[in-house]
Every structure is written in C-alpha cells, then in structure tokens.
Image (cartoon, helix red, strand yellow):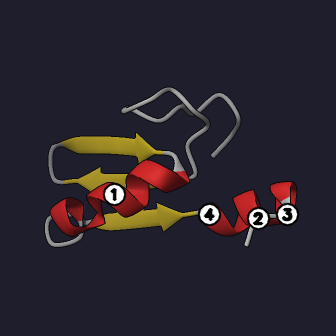
Amino acid sequence: MTAADRCDRCGAQAYVRVVLPVGELLFCGHHARAHADAYQSVATHIQDETDRLHAEHGAG
C-alpha cells in the first residue's frame, strides 16, 4: 500500500486492506482495530501493514 491509499472511514493513510468477496475496504490503524470484529469473519484476505506505521512514526 502507498500513501495514496486512504482510510474509507476518515481519509487518513490506510495501513490495512480488507479484501471481501465483493470488494475491499481500506482502514487506518485506528479504524482497523475498531472494526476488526466486524470484518475478520467475512474477509477473504487481510493485508495488515500497521508495523510500517510504528516504524515510520515511532509508535508503540
């Protein structure tokens, strides 16, 4: 994912891509955690690059 990929909820940089049977969702780290219970059971693939967030911004 690149800086051009934006969270579908708030527009921040996306670090998580959730592939669904009928499309995909992009989330920032915050919204990925907030909605994880809703998408984990229906996702066909989850691309989680939140480790980049921590490396780039020193979080965690």
Callout 4: few (<14), some (14-19), or many (20+) C-alpha neighbours within 10 Å? some
Callout 1: few (<14), some (14-19), or many (20+) C-alpha neighbours within 10 Å? few
Marks 3, 4: nearer the viewer = 3
Is 23 on the left or on the right of 32, as rendered? left
Q: Amino acid at mark 3?
A: Gly
Q: Quadrant of residue 14?
A: top right
Name the residue rendered at 85%, 56% in the picture.
56
Q: Which residue is mark 3?
A: 58
How far is mark 3 from mark 4, CA to CA?
12 Å
Marks 4, 1: nearer the viewer = 1
- State if disc 3 and disc 1 touch (CB < 8 Å): no
How far is mark 4 from mark 1, CA to CA?
14 Å
Is 47 on the left or on the right of 44, as rendered? right
Q: Which quadrant would the C terminus be assigned to in this image?
A: bottom right
Name the residue rendered at 34%, 57% in the picture.
34
Q: Position of residue 6 (x, y in %)?
A: 53, 31
Q: Nearer the viewer, residue 6 or 37?
A: 37
Q: Which mark is residue 59?
A: 2
- Can the viewer see residue 16 in this picture? no
Q: Amino acid at mark 2?
A: Ala
Q: Earlier in the sequence, mark 4 or mark 1?
A: 1
Identify the element where label 4 is drawn: helix
Marks 2, 4: nearer the viewer = 2
Q: Earlier in the sequence, mark 2 or mark 4?
A: 4
Q: Which residue is mark 4?
A: 50
